[in-house]
Amino acid sequence: MGSLSGRISHLSESETLKMSKLSRELNAKGFDVINLSLGEPDFPTPTHIKEAAKKAIDENYSYYTPVAGYQDLREAVCAKFKRENGLSYSPAEIIVSTGAKQSIYNAVLSIVNPGDDVILPAPYWVSYAEIVRMAEGNPVPVKTAIGNDFKITPAQLEKAITPRTRLIMFSSPCNPTGSVYSADELKDLAAVISMHPEIFVLSDEIYEHINFTGSHNSIASNDAIRGQVIIVNGVSKSFAMTGWRIGYLAGPVAVAAACEKIQGQVTSGASSISQRAALAAISSGNAPALEMRKSFLRRRDLVIRLLGEIPGMNLNIPQGAFYLFPEISSFFGKRNGNEKINNAGELCMYLLNHARVSLVAGDAFGAPEHIRFSYATSDERLTEAAARMQKALAELS
């Protein structure tokens, strides 16, 4: 048997999917594991969206789709940007993909050359750095602080930019921290970026509607850098459609065309049925997302209170998404019998084995002194998870 490529040997497994897989394996063995490792709303897809998919099946939407997505769906995405964000796009600037992750992959492969630097404010989503490495670029993490709600400052950004910088990638609301950039904060970052017209910005806005600040702000709203910004969004989080696999990208025509070219050689167009469902979701307003947001806000406050009762948990108050990202280094060096906790990964395995709670170590997000806690499940399960964690952590000394 021949050897696998160096590309594969250098590629890390997704830690979120790894921990979720371990949870499923333990559940299959009869253990009651509370899986808080995945970022997945626990709500069903709204009925009117499911009905649109059933109608699409009856209407024989069963053939290959245009690589860039159905024209009416791309037009609906443009209308959404205009209606909700005050941004004007044409269908030629929109590419529909098999999930927002593919949109990000397409964009990075379209922009980054071998040896190019990509700035990643850390903590960052687990797949950003690995996608950059697949493009043979260099991830350049810029560490942010919990005291600043994990937001990069203009001074930090300016310092990180070099002649090799090609792209800046960030999310707001952020996975894994839940941080949300204000309009003024984005304006200040845009002022720095505007002095470097050769640099692109990828703004991941998949959690747009799970936002507790009252409004979503996109960095693309800053006219000075509009031609440098690529927005990635989708229906997975806002409409509880993770399994439908529909994301989309908005950006300069040249970037969109490059993404279409890549996608045409990799997957072609996204699922026909899923696209018809996404059209119904995007066109019908945000009422389902707003209802889910109420639940997520209640859960956030519940989990902050519960985890705040655990000594050693250093928390901030996230303003969006459905994650907490506590700093947990106070547990490093502690023991339970012969078992010693040296890092966040070992703490996560300890909690999986002793508390039957699945979390994700911060290393994968560029923040090794943290863990990610998803509160996208019921109040009852969150309360039970916190109680189990408190008991298991109290046994460390």
Image (spheres, rainbow, N blue to C red):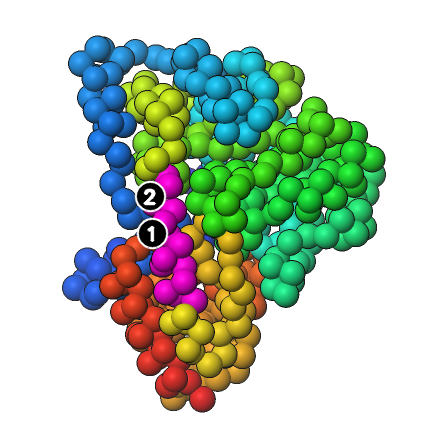
- Quarter holding residue 23: bottom left
Given the image, on which type of amino acid does mark 2 rest?
Glu
User: At 83% across and 38% down in the image, what residue appears?
Assistant: 163
Mark 1 in CB contact with mark 2 (< 8 angstroms): yes
Is residue 201 something that shows in the picture? Answer: yes
Q: Position of residue 35 (x, y in %)?
A: 31, 58
* Horizontal arrangement in the rendering, residue 340 relative to residue 369 (left or right): left
Residue holding disc 1: 295
Q: Position of residue 94 (x, y in %)?
A: 53, 19
Q: Residue furthest front?
A: 214
Label 1 Cα neighbours within 10 Å, binned few <14 / some 14-19 / many ≥20: some
Task: Give the CA distance from mark 1 to mark 2.
Answer: 7 Å
As rendered, which of 5 and 28 lies closer to the eye? Answer: 28
Given the image, on which type of amino acid does mark 1 rest?
Ser
User: At 46% across and 81% down in the image, what residue appears?
Assistant: 311
Q: Is residue 364 above or below residue 128?
A: below
The residue stretch that appears in magenta: 289-304
Q: Position of residue 124 (x, y in %)?
A: 57, 50
Q: Is residue 104 above or below residue 305?
A: above
Image quadrant containing the N terminus? top left
Residue holding disc 2: 291
